[in-house]
Image (cartoon, rainbow, N blue to C red):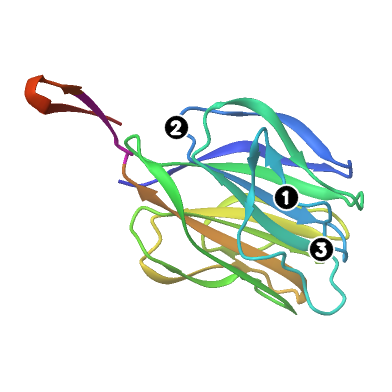
Amino acid sequence: MAHTYSLGRARSSSAGNPITFSYTVAAGDTVICLLLNVASGTSRAGGSPTWGSYTFTQRSSTQKAAASPEASAELWDVLNPFPGTATLTIPNTGALTIKYTVVIGRAAGGGYSAFDVASGGNNTSTNPTPGAATVTTAGDIGFAVIAGGAQTWAPSAQVGTIIANTDDGATGGGEQYILNPALGPHTLSWTFGTSDDWGAVSAYYKETPPRNLNVFKSVRAANGISVGERSGFK
């Protein structure tokens, strides 16, 4: 049993405050992951993104180079939401230019998803990576986002499967995913030979079995005897 991947919304860009758009969660979508590339040395401000009544959770932390950063990376998720259509909101009180992508993981067989592990890294160097994360279960799906100041972002390879690699001119970045990574320490990365500033985040999600709800019914018989009946529902 393992997750499958789907692209929820292709990479878009906006400097709105806030950035808002209608987004539909389909039945079976168990990981809604929001990958942000903020094209500024200043971190995005305004708080957590939301989808309808759900608030996204940030994994690792905002990553950008310690010295003279030009862009930062963020990774946020909502797990096991009810399907439907609602407004997805990305606060952006600094009115920065943000490149945002929505990606989807689907647990198999009516199962659910749970957060497994995350990692984050930043530097000014070649070959950016969020660093090693210790995957604890089989069937994980992992996502990673990179944001950096490379004038020509054109990696020659990466560990996971490409979602997108985009040269934005003064900055650049990309996203990738991986299915069924090996248990133990695992590192997503990009092979890029030009040294520049970057920040990167990865997060992995594991499957959990279908949830069972036990409903108890009872009636009181003669002489104080209680008779119980249990019904089980997924």
Give how far across and how far down residue 9 sits, in percent.
65, 36
Contact (Cβ within 8 Å) of mark 3 with mark 1:
no
Front in this rendered view, residue 229 or 13:
229
Write down the residue under mark 1: 48
> Marks 3/1: CA distance?
18 Å
- Residue at the image position 37 percent from the left and 65 percent from the top: 136
Residue highlighted by disc 2: 28
Camera-nearest residue between 149 and 120:
120
* Residue at the image position 92 percent from the left and 49 percent from the top: 95
Q: On the image, which quarter does residue 232 sit in?
A: top left
Three-letter amino acid code of the residue under disc 1 = Ser
On whether residue 2 falls in the magenta region, the answer is no
Where is residue 224, by image quadrant?
top left
Does the magenta stretch mainly form a helix, a strand or a loop? strand
Residue range of the region highlighted in magenta in the rendering: 210-218
Query: Which label sits on residue 71?
Result: 3
Q: Amino acid at mark 2?
A: Gly
